[in-house]
Image (cartoon, rainbow, N blue to C red):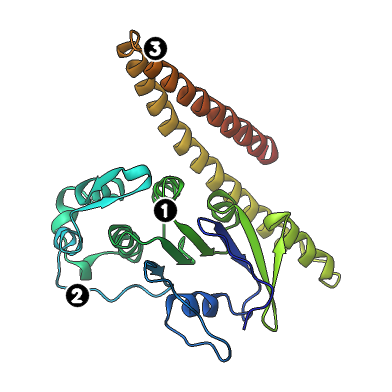
Amino acid sequence: MLQRVQHILGARIGLVGVNGTGKTSVLRLLAGEMSPTSGRIKRGVTLRIGYLSQALAEIDGSARVLDAVENRRRVTELAEGREVTADTLLKDFGFTGDKLTTRLSELSGGERRRLQFLRLLLDEPNVLLLDEPTNDLDIETLTVIEDYLDGWPGTLIVVTHDRYFLERVSDVTYALTGGGRCELLPGGIEQYLAGRAAAAPPEPVRAEAKSVESAAARDRRTGKEMARIENQLAKLDDRIAALHESMADAAADHVRAGELNAELGELLSRKQSLEEDWLTLAEDAG
């Protein structure tokens, strides 16, 4: 099905293409839910695949949130051997208080999506396949998922129409162009969109109402991205404040103080970059 594809362990791959080019089929092939029409797929014995499909996972609707998670696993390991408890994951993904005892059948689509992703993390996969993971998710949940993916050490292959999410979590982009062909895009999603725009036929003159609608849609996208950046900045400020406290406690330990100072420098650089992105968006919106 696919030609000219190279894959590197630990890569973070974004997969794009118009509807019908087979993006979901590729993920299903890799997940073992489909068989190739020719050739074969060889899987290593240590391979652990986590597949987030577009369909909501079928979980017993009578089960309660806490049980559905703790029955899976109580502790999971993320990057660099860091262990995270199921309770911490539940809190980070917005399941607290009465939500912990809510039956799954009573959850909204977005909440079920969050739970689906959380349960995948507990399985400790070393390959994550995400098919439109941003469907039904609010900005805060998207930020949580992005943060977890930042610290997740495995291979990631994601299909999404959300360009901001794609740029945030992937390092390399491939485009499915039809006929089983897969093209590496060194310029990322921008190269893909520019290519589509160049190949598209001239558009007819749009009605004024259509232009207003398009402008409103752009404003909504800009507002959404600005809110996501503000959320990330708030979290960075908390981490920076905590680092300052740790540096004060480690003043006598020069090695530890140096490590903390290096980490602080990275966070401040990240904060500056986000602030510049926010200002650019604000200028565009103005």
For the residues marked 1 and 2, what is the alpha-carbon distance in whole angstroms? 24 Å
Q: Residue at x 39, y 68 (%)?
A: 49
Vertical comparison of 243 with 279: above or below: above
Q: Residue at x 43, y 63 (%)?
A: 127
Give residue 110's quadrant in the image: bottom left
Q: Secondary structure at mark 2?
A: loop
- Please name the residue that numbered disc 1 is placed on: 138
Q: Amino acid at mark 3?
A: His
- The mark nearer the N terminus, 1 or 3, is 1
- The mark nearer the N terminus, 1 or 2, is 2
242 vs 37, left or right, is left
Give residue 217's quadrant in the image: bottom right
Give the quadrant of the N terminus.
bottom right
Among all residues in the image, which is located at the extreme right? 202
Give the quadrant of the C terminus.
top right
Residue 203 visible to the viewer: no
